[in-house]
Image (tube, helix red, strand yellow):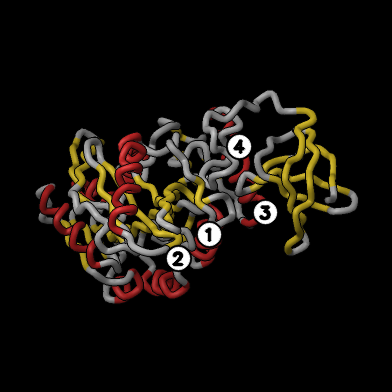
Amino acid sequence: MEIVQGSIEKLIWGAFGLLRDRNHGIILIPYVLPDEEVEVEITGKKRGVSWGKVIKIINPSKRRITPKCKFYGMCGGCNLQHTDTEFQKDLKLDMLEELIRRNFKGKIETTPVLQGDCWNYRQKVTYRASVNDEKTKIGLLEENSCNIVEIDNCMIIDEKINDIKDSIKDRIGNDVKGNIDLIRIMARCDENEVDYFSPDIEVLKTDKTLNTIIRHSGKTFAYQYNARHFFQINPVMARRLTQQINAYLSAYEKDLLIDLHCGVGFFSIALAPFFRKVLGCDIDKENADQSSRNAIINGFNNVEYFNQSDIEFLRNQSCLDYACILLDPPRDGLDKNLLRQLLIKKPRQIIYISCDPPSFLRDIEILIDIGYKCDIISTVDFFPQTDHLEIWSPLLLRDK
């Protein structure tokens, strides 16, 4: 066991503390804070960077607190509970700006982090379960592992989902025969109900319809969905992000909005009253069908959704001179072929929403190179107690 002692210089993206050592170079360590003096065990090396885990905090930060969750450090969900939520906002912005300095060749401003409720805010979770020798386990995955941590309560999940976990466990015990590892159970809730299903065990489902109402800009929007659909994990903060987008768009003529990753239509339906026409697509048929139903529920006749991939849908569009494209891709960012279509079509305006700043910065740089202007990144904390951060930017074609 090799032990190193030193001071944490800063946190980098992923909430890893950076420690410089004469023999090991850069060492990255989780669960630390800037300026802390720590004793660290070296656990490995990858791509020229050493990794370590804290053995002892010799001189703790004044911003270090005792985590509220008794499973903190075991479950792989949270990694910033050891500091207060105000400081979490500062750390997330610092990590984002450090990421920009290292990976972005241009200049771009960032906004202060907008934050809401910091506990029990998640309305979706993926439980993992196993049945071995007639013993059932259910919980969340251990950090960097496939082992299940049998939690009794997750402090960032909505309490309704916490409350139903034991009944899911009982159903698994009754319905699953033989030994099975790592059963996935997707649970999602609204203000009143919980719906869940397992892609691994067909009978493990509830088939409930969930309902969420959001209000912004003096208007009310209703959504129906279930655990199989893509819907926002933190709809309260997603509403506030939508308000920011609408405030930005108020300065521009709003003709056509194209939502290329529509899910069940959360953003495009909330923006539909402000555009002449709204089109959306999703490669998942259940999402595309439900977004169409949500448009009808809200009484919109200017909204139409299609079951197509983003690349196919964009390829089939003709003139986009007055279009605003809404991008909210998966964590990996934009497909190269989609970027190629954006280069060909060159819509007037793009709104890019992302939960992964590294892939976002990579894509933004490509879009700037093909003629777009991007001056600011807005930050919204969808995921308190973790290093994750939702960001968005408006992009405008320079010659339009």
Looking at the rendered structure, the secondary structure element under dot 1 is helix
Residue occupied by mark 4: 91
Quarter holding the C terminus? Answer: bottom left
Residues at discs 3 and 1 in contact (Cβ within 8 Å):
no
Residues at discs 4 and 1 in contact (Cβ within 8 Å):
no
The residue lying at 52 percent from left, 32 percent from top is 69
Q: Which mark identifies residue 190?
A: none
Number of the front mark, 4 or 3? 4
Q: CA distance from mark 2 to mark 4?
A: 27 Å
Q: CA distance from mark 4 to mark 3?
A: 16 Å
Q: Position of residue 47 (x, y in %)?
A: 74, 64
Q: Nearer the viewer, residue 161 or 290?
A: 161
Q: Amino acid at mark 2?
A: Leu
Q: Position of residue 145 (x, y in %)?
A: 57, 56
Q: Residue furthest front?
A: 133
The residue lying at 32 percent from left, 36 percent from top is 163
Mark toward the start of the polypeptide (3 vs 1): 3
Residue occupied by mark 3: 102
Residue occupied by mark 1: 359
The residue lying at 27 percent from left, 71 percent from top is 308
Q: CA distance from mark 3 to mark 2?
A: 20 Å
Q: Which mark identifies residue 334?
A: 2
